[in-house]
Amino acid sequence: MSDQKDHEQPEVNEENLQVEAVETADTEEPAEAEQISPELQIEALEQALGEAKESVLRAQADAINAQRRAEKEIEKARKFALEGFSREVLVVADNLERALSVVNPEDESVKPIVEGIELTLKSFSDVLAKFNVEAVDPHGEPFDPQLHQAMSIVPNPEVEPNTVIAVMQKGYTLNGRLIRPAMVMVSKAD
């Protein structure tokens, strides 16, 4: 049965013939082609050339901008690749500083230990500085919420209000970007 449908001829009627005649009339080229003046052809070609040049310039500018963005991203990635690692090893510097703060340096029995801790802290600080990790120790400076985290506010008439009067934990920056804020005590007016 399906073979019969494939071989059936479409019904021919007057409407189908008129539609076909209109479609073929639209696609046929006129016998007499209109002549376009050379001036108009030159003008059209110059316009197309101008658009093509503009398109090429835009494409070049886009390529240059993409290259610059990629270079900036690569530089940023290089600069801050150590951020997570630096943040983790800062705990070691904190612990060495705490050890020095609780030991009596005048006690002769612990003097060699204090010297060892001081040397270790100095070499550790040198390594951090080599990779542009710098300490933020704002004691006596005005409070800066971009670099400091206020842990408490204490009335103190001896200093200006909003001045850092104690540093509980140093902050650190990597290539100028804050990786850990300094934890501080801030003065306020009475």
Image (cartoon, grey):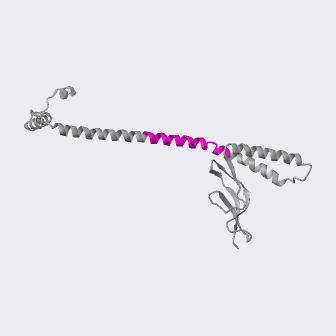
Q: Nearer the viewer, residue 40 or 182?
A: 40
Please indicate whether residue 146 sits to the left or right of residue 167 in the image.
left
Tell me which corner region of the image, top left, top right, bottom left or bottom right, holds residue 131: top right
Farthest front residue?
Answer: 39
Point 64% across, 45% down: residue? 84
Where, quadrant-wise, is the C terminus in this rendering?
A: bottom right
Please report the bounds of the magenta region as a residue range.
63-86
User: Does 52 sit above or below residue 158?
Assistant: above
User: Does 100 sit above or below residue 161?
Assistant: above
Q: Position of residue 182 (x, y in %)?
A: 69, 56
Please indicate whether residue 160 sits to the left or right of residue 72 in the image.
right
Q: Nearer the viewer, residue 28 or 46?
A: 46
Point 60% across, 43% down: residue? 79
Please indicate whether residue 16 sits to the left or right of residue 52 in the image.
left
Q: Nearer the viewer, residue 64 or 74?
A: 64
Q: Position of residue 109 (x, y in %)?
A: 92, 48
Tell me which corner region of the image, top left, top right, bottom left or bottom right, holds residue 165: bottom right
Assess whether residue 81 is covered by the magenta stretch.
Answer: yes
Farthest bottom residue?
Answer: 190
Q: Position of residue 158 (x, y in %)?
A: 74, 70
Where, quadrant-wise, is the N terminus in this rendering?
A: top left
Q: Main secondary structure of the magenta part?
A: helix
Farthest left residue?
Answer: 14
Q: Position of residue 12 (x, y in %)?
A: 10, 33
Point 49% across, 43% down: residue? 69
Assess whether residue 27 is covered by the magenta stretch.
Answer: no
Please indicate whether residue 109 sits to the left or right of residue 27 in the image.
right
